[in-house]
């Protein structure tokens, strides 16, 4: 049980940055995939595809049994697809669609939201308007930024059920060893650097003060946000007023639009180069290692045993560290440090309805059920993620697992309303591959930064010109 849950939690560590290359193939093959189902494959069930390791047998049982109580007339099948990461998961979904066994709903993280919306998904606008009275409680409990991240060109495509922001986890044992205090909420980049130096001085040669993985979520992007920049220029699509005016008060809907747009690459922007140079300086000083690829599966072990002092992670790590045997008081969490700004980044997830579905009304009933508080409370018992519903984050929820400053998870949104999603345009698969490739090269040395970013810029421009 513990091993299984730990693995699921570790996989969730990569859920918002593990890659989405298969999505490009799904979209490119759309014309071929929208034919009629193969006869005999349909048993009358509403089929929901989820990432298997993140949704194990207990989660599947929770969803199916609970949904049956509310909708005994709808036959539900949860297809927990066993996959290594999101890229592998979407590749398997593509295979199902090609075989004429497409699910009705697919669990999609931020990386896939816009691509699914553009080529595969159904907007939820009409249902949301129709059932506004029923949904009012949901929207009042969910931060508008999460909802906006599930919009595309003015329409809503998913109801967010979970998210994870890249906050900073600190090992309390390492803090104590360094004689350092827990950092203040408004700590700066310079405070962060000073803390890493204190940790290094007080630890042995096998110790790494700061560890991070090379990926879209939680990699270099949080530092770009902190330095008031982004990999791609960011703006808001027009529209969305139908939702904001209906469900959010004036203060909460101010500045909201019809979804995020990420367009012109800006890898050679001075602030992007400044962020990379800062990370290269940390590596040069021995305060962190060159970032590894992958989803950080080895990180819980090295962090829990005090071989790493600080790392960016989301609310999912509270459950992961607890299941790995770390005491609630062994670690804590703080906001990402401030630089030019203290804007932070997150990834979210929810259910996308496929255009091929013949059960769209039934699918909508499942989407609403999956976003209910009682459903999410049962589903996220082990703190394997951060619930999208604000009211679920309570002292009682984190009493056993920690951390002490659990409020940070949702306050990353509430106290920093400009915190936004990782840049994930429809071309996200190629954008991510370019980012990972050139980030590794850029951080070989401080001299490598500028030429690597120039190559990154060129490759990003080619990626963004391609029609997905």
Image: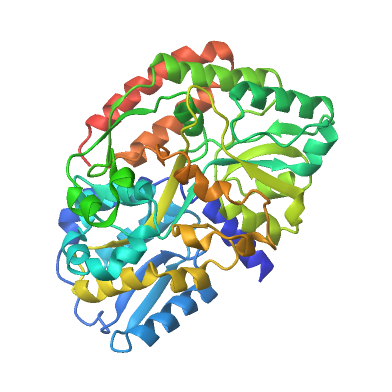
In the foreground, 401 or 186: 186
Horizontal side, residue 239 vs residue 78: left or right: left
Say if 291 sits above or below 329 in the image: above
Q: Residue furthest bottom?
A: 72
Does any portion of residue 100 appear in the rendered image? no
**Residue 37: image x %, image y %?**
19, 72
**Residue 66: image x %, image y %?**
43, 81
Q: Choose top left, top right, bottom left or bottom right for residue 142.
A: bottom left
**Residue 24: image x %, image y %?**
29, 46
Q: Residue furthest front?
A: 250
In the foreground, 314 or 355: 314
Say if 130 sits above or below 175 in the image: below
Q: Choose top left, top right, bottom left or bottom right for residue 133.
A: bottom left
At x 44% / y 83%, what residue is drawn? 65
Say how the picture is coloured.
Answer: rainbow
At x 58% / y 23%, what residue is drawn? 279
Total numbered badges shown on the rendered structure: 0
**Residue 405: image x %, image y %?**
64, 48
Say if 375 sits above or below 233 in the image: below
Quadrant location, the C terminus: top left
Does any portion of residue 265 appear in the rendered image? yes
Horizontal side, residue 86 vs residue 204: left or right: left
Quadrant location, the N terminus: bottom right
At x 25% / y 80%, what residue is drawn? 42
Horizontal side, residue 275 vs residue 428: left or right: right
Horizontal side, residue 422 vs residue 338: left or right: left
């Amino acid at each position: 049980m513990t091993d299984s849950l730990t693995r699921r939690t570790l996989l969730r560590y990569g859920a918002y940055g593990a890659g989405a290359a298969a999505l490009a193939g799904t979209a490119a093959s759309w014309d071929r995939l929208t034919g009629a189902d193969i006869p005999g494959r349909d048993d009358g069930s509403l089929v929901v595809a989820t990432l298997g390791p993140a949704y194990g047998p207990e989660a599947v049982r929770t969803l199916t049994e609970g949904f049956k109580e509310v909708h005994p007339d709808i036959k539900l099948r949860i297809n927990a697809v066993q996959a290594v990461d999101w890229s592998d998961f979407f590749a398997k979904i593509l295979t199902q669609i090609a075989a004429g066994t497409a699910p009705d709903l697919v669990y999609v993280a931020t990386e896939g939201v816009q691509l699914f919306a553009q080529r595969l998904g159904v907007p939820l606008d009409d249902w949301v308007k129709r059932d506004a009275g029923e949904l009012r409680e949901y929207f009042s409990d969910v931060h508008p930024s999460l909802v906006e991240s599930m919009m595309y060109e003015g329409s809503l495509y998913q109801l967010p059920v979970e998210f994870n922001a890249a906050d900073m986890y600190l090992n309390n044992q390492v803090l104590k060893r360094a004689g350092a205090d827990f950092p203040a909420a408004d700590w700066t980049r310079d405070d962060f650097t000073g803390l890493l130096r204190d940790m290094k001085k007080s630890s042995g040669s096998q110790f790494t003060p700061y560890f991070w993985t090379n990926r879209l979520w939680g990699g270099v992007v949080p530092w770009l946000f902190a330095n008031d920049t982004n990999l791609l220029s960011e703006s808001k699509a027009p529209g969305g007023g139908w939702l904001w005016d209906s469900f959010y008060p004036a203060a909460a809907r101010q500045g909201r639009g019809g979804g995020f747009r990420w367009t012109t690459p800006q890898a050679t922007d001075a602030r992007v180069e400044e962020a990379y140079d800062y990370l290269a300086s940390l590596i040069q000083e021995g305060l962190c290692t060159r970032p590894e690829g992958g989803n950080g599966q080895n990180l819980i072990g090295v962090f829990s045993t005090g071989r790493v002092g600080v790392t960016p992670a989301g609310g999912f790590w509270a459950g992961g560290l607890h299941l790995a045997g770390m005491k609630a008081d062994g670690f804590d969490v703080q906001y990402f440090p401030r630089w030019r700004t203290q804007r932070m980044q997150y990834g979210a997830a929810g259910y996308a309805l496929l255009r091929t579905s013949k059960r769209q009304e039934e699918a909508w009933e499942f989407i609403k059920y999956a976003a209910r508080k009682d459903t999410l409370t049962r589903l996220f018992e082990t703190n394997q993620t951060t619930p999208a519903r604000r009211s679920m984050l309570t002292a009682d929820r984190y009493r056993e697992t920690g951390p002490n400053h659990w409020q940070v998870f949702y306050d990353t949104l509430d106290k920093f309303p400009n915190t936004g999603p990782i840049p994930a345009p429809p071309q996200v698969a190629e954008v991510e591959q370019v980012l990972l490739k050139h980030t590794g090269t850029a951080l070989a040395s401080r001299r490598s930064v500028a030429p690597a970013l120039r190559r990154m810029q060129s490759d990003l421009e080619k990626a963004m010109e391609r029609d997905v």
